[in-house]
Image: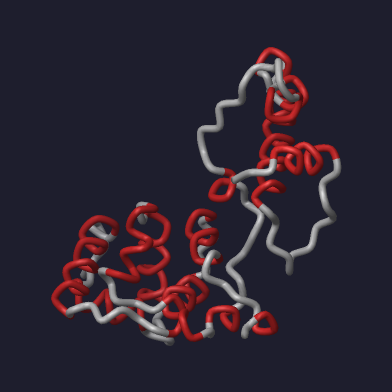
Amino acid sequence: MLDIANIRHFYFHPPADDPDRLPSREELYACMERRDVENCILTGGDPREWGLGKHGALIGGPGKPPRHIAQDPEFAIPYRSPRPLTWFQHPKALSAPPTPPEEVHAFFAHLSGGHLAGYPDRPTGAELAWIFRSPHLTTIERDQVRHVFACIHPWDLPGLLWSGGMSVHEVARAIHICTTRRQDVIAWINLFAVPPDNRV
């Protein structure tokens, strides 16, 4: 549950940039609101007319127009990179579900067909599953993985683990190797990150 008072606090008092610290959800909502106010002004709009910032209920409080948020700021604001691979080396991140090979191949065939359809010599499901798990990729394989992450539907991300039979560490490594910067992919994988010094 969001702490509205904290969102209002961070809206007026944004914390200093710190790339090693994951921002709270409240900070992201405040950042989104500041960004939307700024964009409204830059495009000749009036934040008061749109109920943005202090003119809307989210920041201005009761009695102001309610704020409709179309996209979750956790997946929309370009603010972060994937956590270091060492953050995905805890026991839960290293274990993979016991998914039957035929299910793994079918899932990756779905990804290949849906997101690499125009690619020359498109990999089969079995080939793409192997590529995603490999710690060493050719330039073409890296491009294929990057392309899948650029196009993948958010609801298919958990499928990499359950239907694809990958461990969190393997997915994080694939994200690092292909250097994707798609924010919803990065926000999703960062949910599993645990700093090495925080492990019990």
Q: Residue furthest left?
A: 102
Image point 33% across, 68% down: which residue?
Answer: 160
Q: Is residue 32 left or right of residue 130?
A: right
Q: x, y (%) of residue 139?
A: 42, 77
Q: How is the protein colored in the picture?
A: secondary structure
Q: Is residue 75 above or below residue 38?
A: below
Image point 74% across, 27% down: which residue?
Answer: 53
User: Depth check: 162 or 105 in front?
Assistant: 162
Image point 34% across, 77% down: which residue?
Answer: 166
Q: x, y (%) of residue 117?
A: 23, 57
Picture quadrant where residue 10 is located: top right
Q: Which quadrant of the rendered structure holds the C terminus?
A: bottom right
Q: Is residue 145 above or below residue 130?
A: above
Image point 73% across, 65% down: which residue?
Answer: 21
User: Depth check: 160 or 60 in front?
Assistant: 60
Q: x, y (%) of residue 40?
A: 69, 24
Q: x, y (%) of residue 176?
A: 52, 74
Q: Is residue 94 left or right of residue 60?
A: left
User: Depth check: 144 or 49 in front?
Assistant: 49
Count of numbered marks: 0
Q: Is residue 102 above or below residue 89?
A: above
